[in-house]
Amino acid sequence: MRYHVLACDYDETLAKGGIVAPETIEALERLSRAGIKLLLVTGRELDDLMAVFPQVEVFDAVVAENGGLLYDPGRRETEPLAEPPPPELAERLRREGVSPLGVGRVLIATREPHDVQVLEAIRELGLELQVIYNKGAVMVLPAGVNKASGLAAALDRLNLSPHSVVGVGDAENDHAFLTAAECGAAVANALPALREASDLRLAGENGAGVSELAEMLMSGELDAIEVPRRAVLLGHRGDDEVRLPPYGVGLMVAGPSGSGKSTVTTALLERLAGTGYQCVVVDPEGDYAEFPDVTVLGDPDRVPGVEEVLRVLRQPGQSVVVNLIGLQLRDRPGYFAELLPRLASLRAALGHPHWLVVDEVHHLMPAELRTVPLREAGDVGSLLMITVHPDAVSPAALHLMTHTLAVGKEPEATLAAFARAAGHDAPRLEPTEGDLALWRTGTATAHRVTPAPPTVERTRHRRKYAAGTMSKDKSFYFTGPDDRMRLRARNLHTFVELAEGVDDGTWTHHLRRGDYSAWIRDVLGDAELADRIGEVEENPEGPEDGRRRVADLIAERYTLPAEPTDFDPDHD
């Protein structure tokens, strides 16, 4: 399910002439029993609302006074969300005969044409207040307070995300909160400007329109309706943008080492996080440990507990990297098998996370795995899997993929490997320009796409390889010709340090076998550096000159730390 929250305006949306029809109440009750949270977002003062709407307790929270007041019907507690206007404003308006005049906890309300007196009083008193209109009503509120700010406060109290909300309204003051919602709907009697700006135009008026929307939520029909403004940019096909829906997508990014998978993934993550979608990155190799604006759980010495991950994710504005570099390769599938259904359960309860990103997925869901605890990618919002070897991934996981993005110089081979493993016919690749090949699973043709670059240049691999801690299976080991030593280089910095300290026989042994270039090409994925070091291996000089040349080549390409890192060659 894409939407877990229904946020409704009251007057002329939920209610007609101030009264809510019994069948509309029944529709709301069905939604509540189905686990969908209900929020009422109204310009009315709370006492006025409760006098005409005794069934207010069907809602989980009420935003009243056009965003100025939050009410919890279950606890019967109110909370002002801003400071009230100074008393002298209401006093002046009374003296001038402004009527009607409502004074709430935060809001002052009247009707046109008294907005002229209101604006003059605000200006002469030097107050930082705003005037909001609603079908002839005039509302005075502190700057920045509106239905969108009130909705945000209510969602925050309930650990919910605006990306899980469908909102519905009818008038000028509903623009803000409908824009903040993932999908904004307008009832049939809404102002033309609001209907034009909405994502969904309902056929029914007032409560009938809300009941119509409730049925679309219950049936799943609403999930399939595209909201173009929410689609995430992937790249361009000629002059046209290529975008993906933010929900229900299963995207595999596949290609050889060093082909640019990380750049494509990083760019997509930046756009998702930048628009408030909660992302969970399962990171087996510590590649995302320095990704900005996320909480990183785990390090080489500590594996994060599943409960710890879920506790952080309950806050919808917080994305998380689950760093599994401290976990043995053989134990990673078991950890992921425990984490995955818990993420699906969290989403079922709260509507987030929105995207699950699984790097090195062939390590976490290998081909031998027969089943996965997901019916579809939508069970975790959307699912992005990254791999060098599509045919090494569980077929059950491959069947969740709606799209494949092939990266590298031979995209046809990558797409064919995926299609073969997933039981599909390989697509034809259109003969146009583009660095990527995007295939919608099961269609006949894959399309070339030019990727949209990350907004910030990423150097995470370089940082990790230069001074981070690589896993045991990816580290370099100086063993010597007789395997009498086992000095582990966890990164390029320690590689250069150890190279300077090993005896000439050990250095030359690995040089002649081409071990240095093989490690850099196969593990680091840096073919250019590997080729240049390969030239040193093919044209050996004295051990001292060889060490210097290799160290210089590494220093040219990677920024090594100025100070030495702690290193214990006996610790594995």
Image: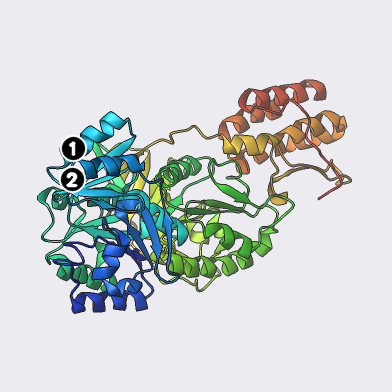
List the residue tagged with mark 2.
98
Identified by mark 1, the residue type is Gln
Residue 519 shows in this picture: yes
Point 41% across, 45% down: residue: 83
Point 11% across, 65% down: residue: 203
**Residue 471 to residue 538: above or below:** below
Residue 220: % across, % down: 28, 70
* Left or right of 406 in this view: 133: left
Point 39% across, 69% down: residue: 73
**Residue 136 to residue 541: above or below:** below
**Residue 321 to residue 241: above or below:** below
- Mark 2 burial class by Cα count in 10 Å: few <14, some 14-19, many 20+: some
Labelled pair 2, 1 in contact (Cβ < 8 Å): yes
* Left or right of 500 in this view: 169: left
**Residue 439 to residue 3: above or below:** above
Q: Quadrant of residue 140?
A: top left
Task: Look at the image and tell me in which quarter the N terminus lies.
Answer: bottom left
Q: Which mark is residue 4?
A: none
Identified by mark 2, the residue type is Val
List the residue tagged with mark 1.
117
Q: How is the image coloured?
A: rainbow
Residue 300: % across, % down: 71, 50
Residue 259: % across, % down: 49, 40
Q: Which of these two is toward me, 443 or 146?
A: 146
Sequence-wise first label, 2 or 1: 2
Residue 50: % across, % down: 29, 68
Q: Secondary structure at mark 2?
A: loop
Q: Secondary structure at mark 1?
A: helix
- Mark 1 burial class by Cα count in 10 Å: few <14, some 14-19, many 20+: some
Q: Which of these two is toward me, 355 or 398?
A: 355
Q: Quadrant of residue 17?
A: bottom left
